Image: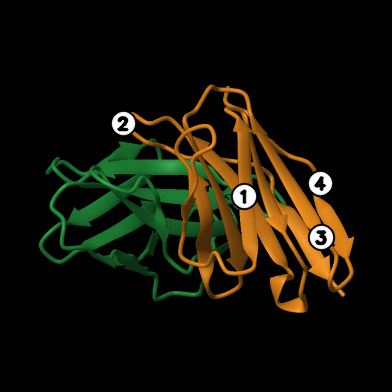
Chain colours: A orange, B green
């Protein structure tokens, strides 16, 4: 079975802190994604990566950056956390070929105070 | 750009009933995949069912089936003989076959199955 793991289930940070969210997948997938999930808005794509050291902006990249130094690991970085970044963050991975199903991690609920 | 709309924020049915969740989408492309994902309370998001737009036959997976109307850009999910374990958030999503490899999600429908 595909396994996508995220470093923390719950995280509390202070405004202005630098925050790292880590995601690891074990199925040799080329594509990895970071979403944030907010009530009434569904999932919105922050960044994605289709190969090592490659990244592309999603729909809401402002205030975030990413790093993919190894194929299995995709990190989301909040350079200076703000209260409006309080949210559920979901990582996902998928193979490059059809049927392109995305496999999700358990999520990290981040609270910025 | 693709958009997905789920017009039912919440739904509630009794156990063993049949329930249909609505989803409409918009894309100018002809080749794409459609997905329904399920997110149980405090648990991981999992795929429920997938439909290829080039297939006319509606996809089915056990108690789950879709009504795919390509011309109307509608992709509803029917859950038959609903069970307590079907209680979850359900998300509809679309992905193009060519180009950007991302999913575009709807807002979600919170489904509660009552005993």
Q: Is residue B83 left or right of residue B74?
A: right
Q: How crowded is mark 4: few (under 14 residues within 10 Å), some or many (20 or more)?
A: some
Labelled pair 3, 2 in contact (Cβ < 8 Å): no
Please give the chain letter of the residue carrying mark 4. A
Instruction: Give the residue number, with chain letter if any, for mark 2.
Output: A98
Q: Where is residue A86 in the image (x, y as percent from the top left)?
A: 74, 70
Q: Is residue A28 left or right of residue B32?
A: right
* Front-most of residues B15 and A8: A8
Comparing marks 3 and 4, which lies closer to the viewer?
3
- Label 2 secondary element: loop
Mark 2 and mark 1: span between their CA atoms? 25 Å
Please give the chain letter of the residue carrying mark 1. A
Labelled pair 2, 1 in contact (Cβ < 8 Å): no
Q: Residue A8 carries which label?
A: 4
Please give the chain letter of the residue carrying mark 3. A
Instruction: Give the residue number, with chain letter if any, for mark 1.
Output: A66
Q: Residues within 10 Å of mark 3 (few under 14, many from 20)?
A: few
Mark closest to the chain's N terminus, 4 or 1: 4
Res A101 → quadrant: top left
Q: Can residue A39 be seen in this view?
A: yes
Q: In which quarter of the image is the N terminus of chain A?
A: top right
The residue located at (64%, 68%) in the rendering is A63
Instruction: Give the residue number, with chain letter if any, for mark 3.
Output: A18
């Amino acid at each position: 079975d595909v396994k996508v793991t995220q470093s923390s289930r719950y995280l509390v940070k202070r405004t202005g802190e630098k925050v790292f969210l880590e995601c690891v997948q074990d199925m040799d997938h080329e594509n990895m994604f970071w979403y944030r999930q907010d009530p009434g808005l569904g999932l919105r794509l922050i960044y994605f990566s289709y190969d090592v050291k490659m990244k592309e902006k999603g729909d809401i990249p402002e205030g975030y950056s990413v790093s993919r130094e190894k194929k299995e690991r995709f990190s989301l970085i909040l350079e200076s956390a703000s209260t409006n970044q309080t949210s559920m963050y979901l990582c996902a991975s998928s193979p490059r070929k059809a049927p392109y199903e995305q496999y999700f991690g358990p999520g990290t609920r981040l609270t910025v105070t | 750009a693709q958009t997905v709309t789920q017009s039912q924020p919440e739904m509630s049915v009794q156990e063993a009933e049949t329930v249909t969740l609505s989803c409409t989408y918009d894309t100018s492309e002809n080749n794409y995949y459609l997905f329904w994902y399920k997110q149980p309370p405090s648990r991981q998001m999992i795929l429920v069912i997938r439909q290829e737009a080039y297939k006319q036959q509606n996809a089915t997976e056990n108690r789950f089936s879709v009504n795919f109307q390509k011309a109307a850009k509608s992709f509803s999910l029917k859950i038959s003989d609903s069970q307590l374990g079907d209680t979850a958030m359900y998300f509809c999503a679309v992905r193009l076959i060519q180009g950007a490899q991302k999913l575009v999600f709807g807002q979600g429908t919170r489904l509660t199955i009552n005993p």
